Each structure stands twice: as C-alpha cells, then as structure tokens.
Amino acid sequence: CVKGATSLAENWDSTHVNNYMYKAMEKALPDGKFKLGQFGRRFRIRALLWYQGESDAGVQSRADNYESNLNALFSDIRTRVGLPNLPISISKVSYDSSPPTYLSTVRDALQNVADGDSNIVISDSQSYSKRDAVHLDADGMFLFGKKMFEVLDTIL
C-alpha cells in the first residue's frame, strides 16, 4: 500500500477515524491473494518495506509517539499475516533543506525500532538523489530500493 503524505499517527492507525491507509492494507492482503489465485499464482509474504515518516515529523505529538505507533503497527501486521518474526526493512527518512521541526525525533524513533528487533533492518535515504527536498527521483528510488533489499537480504 503506497500513498504519499500519510501519517502513521492517523492514516496507519487501526483505531483512528481517518485510517484509510490501514483499511487499504487490510483489503489489499486478501484481495491480492485472491487475484493472484485467479491466475493460478500463489504468494508468500516474505518481508515488509516501510518508507514513511516525513508527515509525522512536522507535528510534535506525532513525532513523540512515532516509535510506539510504529511498533504497534508492525506488531499488528505481523499478527495479521501470521508471521511473528516477519522481516522488515525500514527507510530512515531524510530532508535536504528546511526539514520539519521534529525530523530528528522521527529518525531516532525509526532507528530505535530497528535497534530493538533483530528482524528489522534500516537504511538511510539521505544520500540518494531527490526531485525536491523530500522525494527521491527515479534514480534515487531505484538505487535506494535496491539498497533496502540488499540490507533486508542480510536477515532473510
């Protein structure tokens, strides 16, 4: 499930009134399995990639709760897919200029989540090329995506 400018504190929180990304994820898992099954395909979830945080870095309460919110979401996803040790690759979000006030709080939270779980790895997106202060350009996305999978491969 992908959509820009989403908030972990709201859009990915299963209990929040504006949790449309959480609901999209809930729907995507069985729908994807069903659609692949129609073509005689099967799939097995092997990992999760997480690249989010810039939106939460602009609001102190969201940034302050980012670590606990992310741990709760990862626990929920692992329970939902029946994989308590599901490997996760996290992007440490970055900003090239005029970063949100609480970016360092979110970056620290991402690092803490990774440090607290041997099935989570983290990569920093700071050095990859961007099309603006926040968003990776096509080359940056390709190279950083490759990096996220290389790091993930160390725990698969």
Image: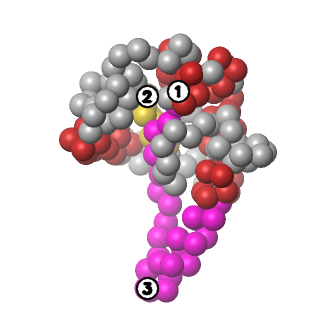
Q: Position of residue 52 (x, y in %)?
A: 50, 36
Left or right of 23 in this view: 37: left
Q: Position of residue 141 (x, y in %)?
A: 29, 42
Look at the image and give the residue range highlighted in magenta. 26-53
Q: Can you say whether 121 is above or below 31 in the image?
A: above
- Disc 2 to disc 1, C-alpha distance: 9 Å
Q: Earlier in the sequence, mark 3 or mark 2?
A: 3
- Disc 3 to disc 2, C-alpha distance: 37 Å
> Residue at 58% of width from left, 65% of height from top?
29
User: Do tag 3 and tag 2 residues touch (Cβ < 8 Å)?
Assistant: no
User: Do tag 2 and tag 1 residues touch (Cβ < 8 Å)?
Assistant: yes
Q: Which residue is mark 3?
A: 39
Q: Nearer the viewer, residue 141 or 135?
A: 135
Q: Which residue is mark 2?
A: 93
Q: Which residue is mark 1?
A: 110
**Residue type at tag 3:** Phe
Q: Earlier in the sequence, mark 2 or mark 1?
A: 2
Q: Can you say whether 1 is above or below 126 in the image?
A: below
